[in-house]
Image (cartoon, rainbow, N blue to C red):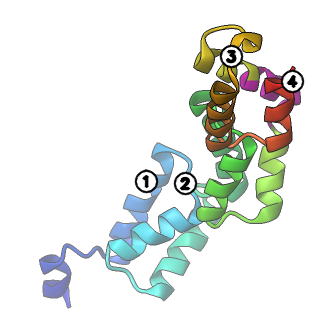
Amino acid sequence: MDEIRKQKKILTPLQAKGKAENYCAYQERAQQEVRNKLYEWGLHQEEVENIIVQLIEDNFLNEERFAKAYTSGKFRMKGWGKIKIKQHLKAKNVSEPLISLALKGINEEEYHKKIEETIQKRIKKPLQTISFAEKRKLYTYMLSKGFENDIILKKINT
């Protein structure tokens, strides 16, 4: 068994736990990310689930903390809207209640300011002077950033 682990560089559960602790300590991780990494390291389901439980108990892994940090980072650094953040959190198997909680952490005033800044950064001239075609492009871009349809339309058509 040890020869097989060495050939494929498969880790023992103890080695994997230590490595997973470092992996989680480096930055906040979703449970699914850690679970995938443990499987990648050659562990079986029972071993993976035991390590996940230990990481949660030792506070290396906290889904709520991850959701809040992810939301904050993507909003502030990447300029993503709530829709895009929600989609990416769902892709990481974060539960709906935690996604909602994390999104509530975004200040509405900051959110609207970010939308206005993104619009101005994109068009580089007064909104009233752009053509219909430019407005359509801007609208599509803002949707791709994950902002809500109704908010974009209000901001573009004022």
Magenta-colored span: 106-115
Q: What residue type is labelled 4?
A: Glu
In depth, the one of 8 and 146 nearer the eye is 146
Of tags 3 and 4, the one toward the viewer is 3
Is 97 located above or below residue 67 in the figure?
A: below
Q: What residue type is labelled 2?
A: Arg
Residue occupying the point 60% across, 58% down: 61
Is 35 located above or below residue 109 in the figure?
A: below
Residue occupying the point 66% across, 23% down: 118
Q: Which amino acid does label 3 sit on?
A: Ile
Query: Based on the displayed image, in which of its 4 quarters is residue 138 positioned?
Result: top right
Q: What residue type is labelled 1?
A: Tyr
Magenta stretch, main secondary structure, is: helix
Query: Based on the displayed image, in which of its 4 quarters is residue 108 positioned?
Result: top right
Of tags 4 and 1, the one toward the viewer is 4
Query: Based on the displayed image, in which of its 4 quarters is residue 50 positioned?
Result: bottom right
In depth, the one of 65 and 5 nearer the eye is 65
Instruction: Classify the position of the N terminus by image quarter.
Output: bottom left
- Residue 107 in view: yes
Which comes sooner in the sequence, label 1 or label 2?
Answer: 1
Which comes sooner in the sequence, label 1 or label 3?
Answer: 1
Task: Give the residue number, with chain letter if any, for mark 2.
Answer: 29
Is 13 located above or below residue 19 in the figure?
A: below
Label 2 to label 3, Cα distance in Å? Answer: 42 Å
Residue occupying the point 61% across, 17% down: 123
Mark 1 crowd level (few <14, some 14–19, many ≥20, 10 Å Cα): some
**Residue 130 bears which disc, if any?**
3
| 111 magenta-colored | yes
Mark 3 crowd level (few <14, some 14–19, many ≥20, 10 Å Cα): few
Q: Tag 1's secondary structure?
A: helix
Q: How many labels does the image show?
A: 4
Task: Give the residue number, with chain letter if any, for mark 4.
Answer: 109
